[in-house]
Amino acid sequence: MTTAITPRTQELLDQGYTLLDGITTDEEAAAALQGLGVLIPQYDGQLLYQVKAVPGFEDRRYSKSTNTVLVHTEAPGWNPPPRYLALHCRVQARCGSGRTELADAYAFIASLSEEERRVVHGEGVDWVGHNTGGTGTAGVRRPVVESTPEGRDIVRFSYNLLTAGHYDPPVDADVPADELPLGSLGGELAVRAESFFRDNKVSVLIPENSILVWDNQRMLHARSSYSDARRHLTRYWLRES
């Protein structure tokens, strides 16, 4: 089945993200997202994942902490990764932070030198298949940018993996370059991506009862730190219909 082109899907195609308003329940969220793709299980095998700070992750850059989450794409060890990622805001942080940040990875790749583009298209990276405390695939070995037979690019990225060898490292992690997936080159690429991201990002404080949806195979994303631990979002993964 082909997804119908609506104003929302056109925004996804044009800018890589869109915002759906006036959604209060899980059932309404599932119905709204149905027009964009098919919900698929996440790391824990469930269709819904609650993004909320819980004790035990205070020293990690992880979705269930209040810490900054650095630039990445979701589930790079999946084959393929989710096409779309959606965050339904149930309780917005009252501190004004906890913002979801997005930037176009295609634009970042285009900004690289010819040699750097050769590396991101040609050098394989071992993207492990699980997250902290979760389950997943066995992982895949793919370049940062994988070209599909259909003629589109899938971007896999994790600042943490390329600089610390782990998706959710301790905030003070310091790993020798020779132990990293792409060595010092990967670390340099991650720093370049972070700099590009900070200069080009869109920062969204998702309104309550709204869903931010973006193309996870195209857009880099991150999250700013926050102090209001009541913040609560529900995350969905989607594949194309």
Image (spheres, helix red, strand yellow):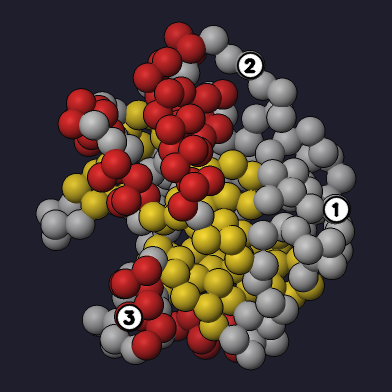
- The percent position of residue 180, horizontal first and vertical second, equals 47, 18
- Using the image, tell me which numbered label, if any, was put on residue 174: 2
Disc 2 to disc 3: CB gap under 8 Å: no
Q: Which of marks 3 and 1 is nearer the N terminus?
A: 3
Q: Is residue 6 above or below residue 169?
A: below
Instruction: Report x, y in % for residue 18.
Output: 47, 75
Could you tell me which residue is drawn at 46 percent across and 23 percent down?
187
Bin the neighbour count of mark 1 within 10 Å (Cα to Cα): few under 14, some 14-19, many 20 and up: some
Q: How many marks?
A: 3
Residue located farthest toward the front when viewing the structure as drawn: 199
Residue at which label 3 appears = 10
On screen, residue 231 versus residue 153, left or right, reads right
Residue situated in front as seen by the camera: 220 or 41 = 220
For label 1, the residue is: 227
Q: Contact, CB < 8 Å: mark 1 with mark 2? A: no
Toward which corner of the image does residue 184 lie, by quadrant? top left
Q: Nearer the viewer, residue 103 or 235?
A: 103
Spatial CA distance of label 3 from label 1 is 35 Å
Q: Is residue 96 above or below residue 71?
A: below
Residue type beneath disc 1: Ser
Residue 217: quadrant of the picture: bottom left
Q: Is residue 194 visible?
A: yes
